[in-house]
Amino acid sequence: MRVVIADDSVLLREGLRLLLAEAGVEVCAVAGDGDGLDHLVEIHRPDVAIIDIRMPPTFTYEGAQAAVRLRERWPDLGLLLLSQSLESRYAAELAREHPEGFGYLLKDRVVDVDRLVEALTQVARGGTVLDPDVVAHLMGRRSARERVQGLSPREQGVLALMAQGASNAAMARDLRVNDKTVESHISSIFTKLDLLPQPDAHRRVLAVLAWLGQ
């Protein structure tokens, strides 16, 4: 797997480069701003771009804007937003319209390199990885409460794991139930959220992303 890293912090991006290299991930190059990231992607054509949201010049949402630009130009490129901040506008656009190969994790929730490599692998394969806090932020607290009223506590737990891209087997292990029970919960969630059957590999993630389409 080949990645590029964009973060204004020299220490963080070089630290990530070393950690990922030790884990067997090829880091093609690093950048300190969105323009530099655009250039690196064009040159190296990586599998995934790791992007901090707050970068120069205003340190607000330049990274998220860069991610939107990259998605438009390179639709097969995996995008992993890795940030200390929560950003709604551009991240929600990506999550709703282009969930394939997209991830958004909070830096302080990535406690080890294995978690990061796992997320990168999922995104590189076209999966979707969303931190639960990110989902709650994008939904808004009031909206979240309203949307989950029809779900049981166990279904809410399954939905949270679905948002993180967990497989049925992984959810069964986490919840200490069998695979058929997980399948039953997922079917119930789809029904209660009015998600009709469709040939879409990311239908599980759409159960969460549907809440963002208001």
Image (spheres, grey):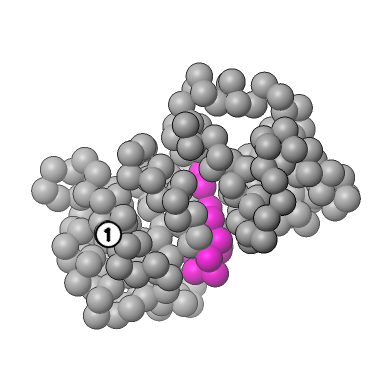
Residue 165 visible in the picture: yes
- Using the image as rendered, state which of residue 204 and residue 33 is in the foreground: 204
Q: Which residues are magenta?
A: 118-133
- Determine whether the residue tagged by mark 1 lies in a helix, strand or loop: helix
Q: Dot 1: within a 10 Å radius of its alpha carbon, few (fewer than 14), some, or many (20 or more) residues? A: some
The residue that appears at 78% across and 57% down in the rendered structure is 169
Q: Position of residue 58 (x, y in %)?
A: 13, 43
- Using the image as rendered, state which of residue 129 and residue 11 is in the foreground: 129
Residue beneath label 1, please? 69
The residue that appears at 25% across and 76% down in the rendered structure is 42
Q: Position of residue 108 (x, y in %)?
A: 43, 43
Q: Position of residue 191 (x, y in %)?
A: 75, 38
Q: Position of residue 109 (x, y in %)?
A: 48, 44
Residue 119 visible in the picture: no
Figure check: 14 above or below 146: below
Q: Is residue 39 magenta?
A: no
Figure check: 16 above or below 165: below
Figure check: 95 above or below 19: above
Q: Amino acid at mark 1?
A: Arg
